[in-house]
Image: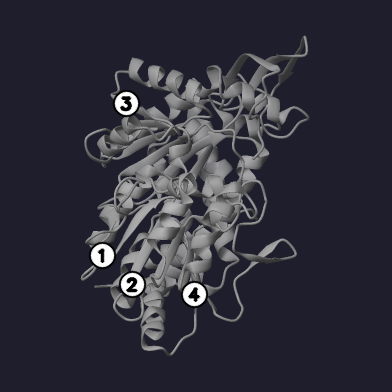
């Protein structure tokens, strides 16, 4: 079995604990989404149960992840077993532990506490940022956290969207502290996962637009989602009006085009349940079979997710796109949420980073607002580093050497419009143009853009050290090609060339 680095490190640490050579009682596993975190509970249980430990208790944020966790566990375990448990019946009779939700423990903390009395158990807290320090969940979980012989905090985002502390984690100057007596940290970053080929890169397409709304009896408008005094109100408006449907249509068109070479799936993320239903209706009117799974976490939503993993190609969701929705064939995401928490967006984008057969990347479509772009910047930097290191390691480069419009009931959206060529709007300094080619004949505009793109890449790569030039070239050309559905540059339209040009200037500036 080929283990990824964090899995190998966890196995080594577990063996050290089992042999008595280590006094570790708390492990922090910082694993980028899609990096293979779900293997860790089985690896720990197989190594430790019967070697000083009796059980494993795996807590997850929602019921769909509980059921998924049970399946993931048994795909990795070789000598132990667990069951997905609710609060009915015996939690772990005949097995070596159970996986359940945080909400189940909060609903009946004494049931779980009594069931674990006298047992040396592993407490595996999956995505613990759901547990606010000092909050209701923390009080309910505290007895289990105190009794556990080993506690594992496992997440790709050790941060809460509200900026508040996570229960059980120490902080210094507002940042989590993972070191100290009896503690160990295992880290597997996005760059690590890309370098190992554990995930694929995710590329982004931003679409700008204008909006009009009414607030306190006054009419307001915004000509762009980027910046301005009314960015939050504009975003709230466009997600509920014509702009959102235009972005959906753009995403659908590109997704359909990509399916000529790879049968991928489309995930649509809506700002709330009511709007998700409108998105679903719009997609179905396009002749596409789609279903909905909202944050209600109902049996119907879980059934639709199960269908999405097999036969269904399009799913509309809200909070259930946040974490744990593992469908490797997702290639496109329409991210129409108001949430601008970096941890939330990272989890959302990661739905498209799973590897699958010939899949080379995921593509995310979203608004052109400043906070969305800021959240993406770190991801792109880490991706570029990981892909560059992968190219260099493989020898390929050696030859040539929570804000944003949520809960604003006083705003009455009137209308919005997505720019058919949002990149050109941005390139022209925010001045709307009737012609995306700036008035040039199409052939001349295409020739000019191709020349500028080639010149820019040549200058950028020329400034890099000899051993990394080929790696940079591959990364840049791959990203530009992915942004236009994999088409060769000589076949691109003016609009597609303008998109590549804008991406090039933003991500690889001179």
Q: Residue at 32% across / 70% down in the picture?
A: 45
Q: Answer above or below: position of 368 versus 467.
A: above
Q: Earlier in the sequence, mark 1 or mark 2?
A: 2
Q: Residue at 49% across / 20% down in the picture?
A: 274
Q: CA distance from mark 1 to mark 2?
A: 19 Å
15 on left or right of 405: left
Q: Earlier in the sequence, mark 1 or mark 4?
A: 1
Q: For the residue carrying disc 4, how many other residues have a C-alpha within 10 Å: few (<14), some (14-19), or many (20+)? A: some
Residues 58 and 217: in front is: 58
Q: Are marks 3 and 1 in contact (CB under 8 Å)?
A: no
Which residue matches tag 3? 290
Query: Any mark on residue 160, and which?
Result: none
Q: CA distance from mark 3 to mark 1?
A: 32 Å
Tell me where residue 179 appears, x and y as whole percent: 60, 76
The residue furthest top is: 217
Residues 118 and 325: in front is: 118
Which residue matches tag 2? 54
Q: What quarter of the picture does the C terminus occupy?
A: bottom right
Q: Answer above or below: position of 263 versus 59.
A: above
Q: What quarter of the picture does the N terminus occupy?
A: bottom left
Q: CA distance from mark 3 to mark 4?
A: 47 Å
Question: Quarter-wise, where is residue 174 in the image?
Answer: bottom right
């Amino acid at each position: 079995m080929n283990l990824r680095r964090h899995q190998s490190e966890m196995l080594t640490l577990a063996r050290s604990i089992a042999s008595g050579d280590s006094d570790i009682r708390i492990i922090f596993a910082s694993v980028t989404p899609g990096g293979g975190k779900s293997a860790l509970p089985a690896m720990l249980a197989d190594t430790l149960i019967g070697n000083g430990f009796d059980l494993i208790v795996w807590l997850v944020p929602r019921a769909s992840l509980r059921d998924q966790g049970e399946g993931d566990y048994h795909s990795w375990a070789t000598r132990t077993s667990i069951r997905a448990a609710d609060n009915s019946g015996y939690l772990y009779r005949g097995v070596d532990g159970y996986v359940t939700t945080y909400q189940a423990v909060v609903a009946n903390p004494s049931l779980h506490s009594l069931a674990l009395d006298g047992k040396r158990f592993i407490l595996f807290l999956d995505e613990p940022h759901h547990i606010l320090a000092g909050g209701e969940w923390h009080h309910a979980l505290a007895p289990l956290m105190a009794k556990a012989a080993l506690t594992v905090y496992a997440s790709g985002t050790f941060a809460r969207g509200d900026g508040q502390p996570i229960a059980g984690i120490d902080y210094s100057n507002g940042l989590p502290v993972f070191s100290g007596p009896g503690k160990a940290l295992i880290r597997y970053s996005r760059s690590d996962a890309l370098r190992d080929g554990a995930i694929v890169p995710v590329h982004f397409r931003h679409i700008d637009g204008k909006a009009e709304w009414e607030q306190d009896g006054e009419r307001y408008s915004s000509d762009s989602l980027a910046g301005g005094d009314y960015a939050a109100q504009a975003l709230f408006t466009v997600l509920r009006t014509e702009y959102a449907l235009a972005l959906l249509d753009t995403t659908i068109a590109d997704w359909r085009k990509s399916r000529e070479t790879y049968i991928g799936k489309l995930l649509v993320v809506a700002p709330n349940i009511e709007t998700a239903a409108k998105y679903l209706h719009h997609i179905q009117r396009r002749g596409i079979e789609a279903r909905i799974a909202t944050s209600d976490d109902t049996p119907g939503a879980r059934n639709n997710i199960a269908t999405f993993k097999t036969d269904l190609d399009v799913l509309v969701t809200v909070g259930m796109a946040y974490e744990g929705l593992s469908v490797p064939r997702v290639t496109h995401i329409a991210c129409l949420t108001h949430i601008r928490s970096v941890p939330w967006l990272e989890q959302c984008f990661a739905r498209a980073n799973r590897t699958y057969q010939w899949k080379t990347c995921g593509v995310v479509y979203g608004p052109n607002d400043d906070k969305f772009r800021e959240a993406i910047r770190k991801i792109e930097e880490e991706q570029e580093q990981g892909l560059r290191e992968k190219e260099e390691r493989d020898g390929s480069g050696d030859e040539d050497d929570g804000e944003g419009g949520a809960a604003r009931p006083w705003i009455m959206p009137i209308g919005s419009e997505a720019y058919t060529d949002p990149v050109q709007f941005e390139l022209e300094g925010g001045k709307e143009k009737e012609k995306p080619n700036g008035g040039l004949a199409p052939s001349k505009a295409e020739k000019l853009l191709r020349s500028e793109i080639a010149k820019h890449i040549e200058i950028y790569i020329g400034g890099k050290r000899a051993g990394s030039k080929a790696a940079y070239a591959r990364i840049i050309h791959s990203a530009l090609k992915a942004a236009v559905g994999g088409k060769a540059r000589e076949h691109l339209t003016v609009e597609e060339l303008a998109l590549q040009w804008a991406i090039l200037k933003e991500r690889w500036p001179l």
